[in-house]
Image (cartoon, rainbow, N blue to C red):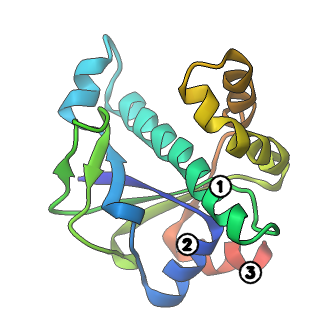
């Protein structure tokens, strides 16, 4: 199953150094039957993209926790897409949520998705607004939309060390 794991730059550094990534709480996102049923239309590619966007939004919460520990943390959403076995559906949490069986090895990573430098200010603002947006605050939803308007850049797994070196 292709999963989308919310991450941060610090987590990408760990993946590069250790060859594996432990998703926070084992949580990832995927094209699940519940996600498919929640959309009236859309092919697999569109629904996979929706799952990736859910992971990118979850990355904002990880960035918020990281920002509390390190005010200089890079404010870039990151998502690791990987092909794994043993992911359990968690539709009790949300349509696309799955629980991973364990850490994900670098050898099964399909791609890295990462914000560009231009997104950092919008992402920093979105980190502060994500909870209010989820509770329906229209101003916070607008702030979140500003960050989500930035497309995540795509990198092959083997490019990860070079991408991190350039940050």
Q: Is residue 145 left or right of residue 25?
A: right
Residue 51 figure quarter: top left
Q: Would you name the residue on which mark 1 appears?
A: 64
Which element carries disc 1, helix, strand or loop?
A: helix
Q: Would you name the residue on which mark 3 appears?
A: 165
Q: Is residue 155 left or right of residue 85?
A: right
Q: Residues within 10 Å of mark 3 (few under 14, many from 20)?
A: few
Q: Residue at x 40, y 65 (%)?
A: 23
Residue 39: x and y in percent read: 32, 17
Between label 3 and label 1, give the one nearer the viewer: 1
Mark 2 or mark 1, earlier in chain: 2
Q: Would you name the residue on which mark 2 appears?
A: 11
Q: Is residue 162 left or right of residue 79?
A: right
Q: Is residue 4 left or right of residue 16?
A: left
Which element carries disc 2, helix, strand or loop?
A: helix
Q: Residues within 10 Å of mark 2 (few under 14, many from 20)?
A: many
Q: CA distance from mark 3 to mark 2?
A: 14 Å
Mark 3 or mark 2, earlier in chain: 2
């Amino acid at each position: 199953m292709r999963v989308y794991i919310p991450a941060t730059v610090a987590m990408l550094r760990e993946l590069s150094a250790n060859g594996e990534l432990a998703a926070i709480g084992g949580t990832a996102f995927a094209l699940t039957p519940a996600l498919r049923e929640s959309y009236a239309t859309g092919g697999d590619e569109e629904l996979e993209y929706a799952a990736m966007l859910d992971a990118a939004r979850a990355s904002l919460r990880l960035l918020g926790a990281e920002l509390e520990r390190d005010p200089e943390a890079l404010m870039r959403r990151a998502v690791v897409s990987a092909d794994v076995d043993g992911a359990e559906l968690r539709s009790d949490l949300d349509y696309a949520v799955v629980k991973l069986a364990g850490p994900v090895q670098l050898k099964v990573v399909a791609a890295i998705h990462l914000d560009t430098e231009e997104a950092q200010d919008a992402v920093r603002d979105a980190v502060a607004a994500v909870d209010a947006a989820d509770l329906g605050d229209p101003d916070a939803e607008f702030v979140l939309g500003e960050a989500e308007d930035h497309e995540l850049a795509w990198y092959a797994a083997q490019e990860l060390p070079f991408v991190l070196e350039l940050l």
